[in-house]
Image (cartoon, grey):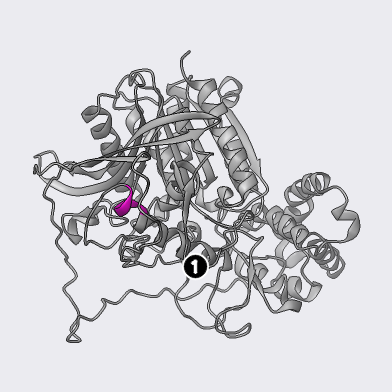
């Protein structure tokens, strides 16, 4: 889910955890498996909850952390393994199981398919295999049934979060606000799954989950803005081909960097004859300059700021008059950042002492920070500074992915690397429950570790040439929209998300140079939640309504 934070994915090697009793025979029926055969990355590149920054020295406001390089883990005898790992690319038939769930008072019978899709080069050689779980409603007409491809981002994140938190028919049990429960963790039926309206395919990026390249060298083919788009596009083409879904209404649902990917896929496949009915952008980031709080990029400080106000309000750090009508306060701040705040930052060192004092007062008033904190940050508040200083009086940090979360820094308040309490709260429940679920209920058996996130993919990511500027797939989405006037886009935004701030997302959509007739194809949904809006139970229910309303409105009748 924006100062320059170098966020590195952590590759988890997770064994299966037995948490859930065997499902009742009437609930699950399994089908036996077949025996057949030198670019610095943008700061918001890895906003998923498994990420924690590498240990580093305390950072001053607006100071860039040093980039750390991954080292190969030593083997049992202390030697480092070779870096060009090779993986088994033998194609194996997916595992198919049969289940049922009640959604909206209606009993649904559905089929789950878990397997790995081969991604081949033009000569037919398998470059990678991408792991996926597909959920299809039994007895439905495939040619009229909507089909949604969904994925998380990173880059370097598996799609476990959308799978087990929002979309799948089974979900991890969290506390109602999204807080971490006590172990052991459990599964429950997901009454908010959109499976009653659309079939679902949850896909893991190459290097994450159980998706693997043939070898490390070929993995780099997929570890970049363009290669990732091409790889996912080929997966989609293969899936609709093998499952005869070319005539189905098609949708994309991407979260975080998955929205970057979705925008790229929309144009890539549009030019290859495969058009989408709708694209859902959850916690969107298409234009990275809108969130990169680097020296000289003042616009990102402005677009991040309204989220500071919302988080400060949540923690009761604003003045009473600002707390009375938060909708009005939010609108006032959005206007202020594009006028007074923007003008002050543009003046730079030419601000008079009185002008500087006035803007410091305004920043402190709208952010909940002290005037001293604002002055020390030179009027430019980045995410690290805000999350560290907002609740300094309590010696706790607020979350980056979700500013509602708070927690003490594991290494102490003063001398600590960047820490996100919202990420640490979600990682253990999701990873352990998924490993249990996929083996026990879906029958997918493998000794391969499930990579919740991939440091290798994240650190090797090709962001493009510096001469091309910040990564930006907004032009791809624009191209797809103007070539297909029926394509609709739903933008979902969480008010407490500092990984992909809601105002930066809206700003991007407002600056795509779309004619009025095409702008009406964009709609919005906002949530009283953070990056993963579905973590909060009430917002998960709202997300379900927003998703099915969007699909109902855009599918052929």
Residue 226 position within the rendered picture, expressed as x and y whole percent measured from the top left: 32, 46
Q: Residue at x 61, y 22 (%)?
A: 516
Could you say which is closer to the camera, residue 28 or residue 326?
28
Residue 271: where, in percent of width, then height? 32, 27
Q: Position of residue 170 (x, y in %)?
A: 44, 45
Magenta portion: prevailing SS class: helix
Which residue lies most toward the front here? Answer: 25
- Report if residue 464 is visible in the image: no
Using the image, determine if residue 334 lies above or below residue 462. Answer: above
Determine if the magenta segment contains residue 529. no
438 falls in the magenta region = yes
Judge left or right: residue 482 versus residue 133. right
Left or right of 460? Residue 413 is right
Is residue 486 shown left or right of residue 78?
Answer: right
Residue 550, image quadrant: top right
* Residue 25 at x, y percent in the picture: 33, 42
- Residue stretch in magenta: 437-441
Whether residue 239 is visible, yes or no, is yes
Specify few, some or many for label 1: CA neighbours under 10 Å numbering under 14, 14-19, or 20 or more.
few
Q: Where is 224 relative to 112, above or below?
A: below
Decide if residue 334 is on the left or right side of residue 110: right
Q: In terms of secondary structure, where does tag 1 sit?
A: loop
Q: In the rendered image, which residue does mark 1 sit on?
A: 183
| Towards the viewer: 207 or 358 | 207
């Amino acid at each position: 889910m924006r100062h320059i934070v170098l966020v590195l994915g952590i590759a988890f090697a997770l064994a299966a955890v037995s948490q859930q009793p065997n499902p009742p025979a009437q609930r699950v029926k399994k089908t036996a498996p077949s025996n057949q055969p030198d670019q610095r990355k943008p700061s918001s590149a890895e906003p998923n909850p498994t990420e924690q920054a590498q240990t580093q020295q305390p950072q001053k406001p607006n100071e860039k952390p040093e980039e750390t390089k991954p080292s190969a883990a030593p083997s049992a005898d202390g030697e480092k393994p070779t870096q060009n790992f090779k993986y088994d690319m033998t194609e194996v038939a997916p595992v198919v199981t049969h289940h049922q769930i009640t959604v909206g008072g209606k009993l649904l019978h559905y089929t789950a398919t878990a397997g790995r899709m081969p991604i081949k080069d033009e000569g037919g050689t398998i470059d990678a295999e991408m792991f996926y779980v597909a959920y299809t409603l039994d007895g439905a007409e495939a040619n009229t049934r909507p089909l949604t491809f969904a994925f998380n981002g990173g880059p370097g994140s598996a799609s476990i979060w959308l799978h087990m938190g929002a979309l799948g028919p089974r979900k991890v049990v969290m506390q109602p606000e999204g807080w971490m429960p006590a172990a052991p963790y459990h599964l429950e039926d997901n009454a908010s799954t959109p499976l009653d309206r659309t079939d679902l395919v949850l896909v893991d990026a190459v290097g994450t989950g159980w998706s693997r390249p043939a070898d490390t060298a070929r993995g780099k083919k997929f570890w970049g803005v363009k290669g990732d788009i091409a790889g996912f596009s080929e997966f989609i083409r293969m899936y609709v081909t093998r499952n005869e879904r070319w005539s189905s209404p098609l949708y994309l649902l991407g979260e975080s960097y998955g929205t970057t990917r979705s925008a790229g896929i929309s144009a890539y496949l549009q030019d290859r004859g495969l058009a989408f009915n709708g694209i859902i952008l959850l916690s969107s980031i298409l234009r990275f300059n809108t969130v990169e709080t680097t020296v000289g990029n003042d616009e990102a400080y402005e677009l991040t700021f309204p989220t500071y106000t919302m988080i400060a309000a949540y923690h009761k750090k604003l003045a009473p008059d600002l707390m009375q009508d938060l909708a009005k306060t939010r609108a006032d701040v959005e206007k202020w950042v594009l006028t007074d705040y923007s003008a002050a930052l543009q003046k730079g060192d030419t601000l008079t002492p009185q002008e500087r004092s006035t803007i410091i007062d305004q920043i402190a008033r709208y952010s909940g920070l002290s005037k001293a904190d604002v002055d020390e940050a030179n009027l430019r508040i980045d995410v690290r500074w805000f999350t560290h200083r907002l609740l300094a009086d309590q010696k706790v940090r607020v979350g980056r992915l979700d500013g509602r979360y708070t927690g003490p820094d594991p290494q102490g308040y003063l001398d600590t690397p960047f820490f996100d309490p919202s990420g640490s709260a979600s990682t253990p429940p999701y990873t352990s429950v998924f490993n249990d679920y996929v083996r026990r209920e879906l029958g997918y058996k493998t000794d391969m570790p499930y990579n919740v996130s991939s440091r290798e993919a994240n650190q090797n990511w090709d962001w493009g040439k510096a001469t091309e500027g910040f990564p930006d797939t907004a032009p791809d989405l624009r191209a797809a929209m103007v070539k297909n006037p029926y394509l609709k886009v739903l933008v979902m935004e969480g008010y407490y998300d500092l990984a992909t701030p809601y105002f930066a997302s809206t700003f991007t959509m407002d600056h795509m140079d779309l004619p009025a007739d095409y702008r009406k194809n964009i709609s919005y949904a906002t949530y009283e939640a953070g990056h993963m809006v579905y973590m909060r139970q009430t917002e998960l229910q709202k997300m379900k309504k927003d998703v099915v309303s969007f699909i109902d409105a855009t599918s052929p009748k």
